Image (cartoon, rainbow, N blue to C red):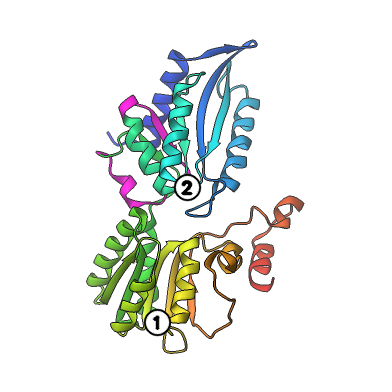
Amino acid sequence: NWRPRWYDAAVILFLCCICVSVSDGGGNVLHIGGIFPIKGKGGWQGGQACMPAAHLALKDVNEKKDLLPGYVLKLHSNDSQCDPGLGASVMYDLLYNEPTKLMLLAGCSTVCTTVAEAAKMWNLVVLCYGASSPALSDRNRFPTLFRTHPSATVHNPTRIKLMKKFGWSRVAILQQAEEVFISTVEDLEARCTEAGIEIVTRQSFLSDPTDAVRNLRRQDSRVIVGLFYVVAARRVLCELYKQNLYGKQYTWFFIVSPVGTDSIWIHVKYVNYKEKLVPAPYFSESRLYYWKRRCWRDGNVTVTSIIIIFYYN
């Protein structure tokens, strides 16, 4: 019989609640390990918003006595900086230091991939709250992984419709060599083929996009789809300026994570290049982040207020 994917996770957590608990001042404490990407210069720092949300959720669960009667949830967390190596170190610290953790929370696709592949060795449930990598949908590879964030490929049909809406019959792809972007592009490329959209070239880079952008110019690419994290996006922006891949004859379609933050447009000191204003038609789509916005603190937030902040500030 069919059952929702979260059902298995709920059953496992329930069994853990019965089998493993620690007495703590009159209540049985269920300990959860949290791996949050907060600091760092690369990848995705969504833990800045997700960690407070996790604490708020635990507070709500603990205050509602009929949810887990006789039990209290407690979160033990550390910063992965969206670095797979550091994320693995944080995971081992959580597992090998008391108290025993019943499950792990993880965010950032690169860290989730590392953590979830290792966690299956302990038959440990991993709940990913911010990982969009399509590769994480592989149940054979990640049997104990569950996530609340959809795969990045769910937006590809919409991206194809946008391309057809604007009449783009030939597009180029520039991607950062991370699994989350590689697997997203593979699905996008297949959908482009089905829709009759030609992929002129597909270029990838690790950290320096110089050669990849130069190859785009050699291929006479005019519509370029870009998939990369914010730090890489700054380097791409500077490189496309140096390679003269801007102006009304070019369109850049950025699928950047996260594009909703201001950080993509500031801190030019990181790329050692002077700030320039150039005509470069582009548009982008991604999540919008407002953890630093005043409207969240003041309350009374409406969709209209968010739109006003985004478009007019």
Residue lying farthest to the right in this orientation: 298
**Considering the numbered disc 2 on the image, is that residue within a helix, a strand or a loop?**
loop
Q: Camera-side residue: 95 or 194?
A: 95
Q: Is residue 40 left or right of residue 309?
A: left
The residue tagged 2 is 82
**Quadrant hosting residue 196:** bottom left
Q: Camera-side residue: 118 or 213?
A: 213
Residue type, mark 1 in image: Phe
273 over 87 or under it: above or below: below
Q: Where, quadrant-wise, is the C terminus in this rendering?
A: bottom right
Q: Residue at x 44, y 22 (%)?
A: 96
Residue lying farthest to the front in this orientation: 272
**Quadrant hosting residue 59:** top right
10 Å neighbourhood of mark 2: few (<14), some, or many (≥20)?
many
The residue tagged 1 is 166
Residue 277 screen position, x and y as percent: 58, 82
Residue stretch rendered in magenta on the structure: 121-140
Residue 300 screen position, x and y as percent: 74, 54
Q: Sequence-wise, which precedes: disc 1 or disc 2?
A: 2
175 over 142 or under it: above or below: below
Depth check, mark 1 against mark 2: the one in front is: 2
